[in-house]
Amino acid sequence: MPNLQSSVVRCLLRLRKAAIRRDTPVETLRFMARRGDWWFRIPRGVEIHPAIVDGVPAEWIVPLGVPSRPVILFIHGGGWTIGLHGLDRRLVAHICRAASSRALALDYRLAPENPFPAALEDCVAGYRWLLRNGTLPQ
């Protein structure tokens, strides 16, 4: 029976192989990325709070006991098409714990439903929202 780590690696390799094929439908890539979300649980002592920042869906990822400053602005990968999923949340949770910080993870609009520059505009809106609400740019 394969262990969890090898199962995750196989899933990620299948996703990478599908992403290389240019004819793979976006819906298939999204399904594959989210398929293993239940494996990527958030570490203990970290909370997730949904938010809307200037019309952009987002999540605050907050380790318990960290100060309200500084803030990490997390913009997930996925080629502007895949979306925020469990692996991203787990990664950011570990980064936040290590940095004693909280993060704002943006769930920007995805292509091809929302053509360029929609996702970029959402990311800039999230950054500007943080600045307007007291986050220092450095």
Image (cartoon, grey):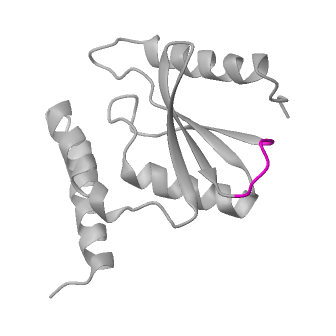
Quarter of the image that includes the N terminus = bottom left
Looking at the image, which residue sits at the far bottom? 1
Where residue 24 appears, as percent x and y from the top left, is 15, 37
Q: Is residue 63 left or right of residue 137?
A: left
132 or 23: nearer the viewer: 132
Residue placed most toward the observer, 91 or 23 = 91
Question: Front-most of 20 and 87?
Answer: 87
Coordinates of residue 26 in the picture (x, y in percent): 20, 32
Magenta stretch contains residue 67: yes
Q: Residue at x 46, y 19 (%)?
A: 119
Please give the count of numbered marks on the rendered protein: 0
Horizontal and vertical percent position of residue 27: 17, 33
Classify residue 117 as left or right of residue 131: left
Q: Position of residue 116 (x, y in %)?
A: 42, 12
Q: Residue at x 50, y 13 (%)?
A: 55
Quadrant position of residue 19: top left
Magenta span: helix, strand or loop, mainly?
loop
Name the side, left or right, on which 124 lies relative to 83. Answer: right
Instruction: Tell me the residue at 39%/62% (across/down).
Output: 41
Q: Quadrant of residue 29?
A: top left
Q: Which residues are magenta?
A: 65-70
Q: Is residue 8 magenta?
A: no
When the figure is inspected, residue 55 is found, relative to residue 27, above or below; the finding is above
The quarter of the image holding the C terminus is: top right
Left or right of residue 101, residue 85 in this image: left
45, above or below 96, in the image? below
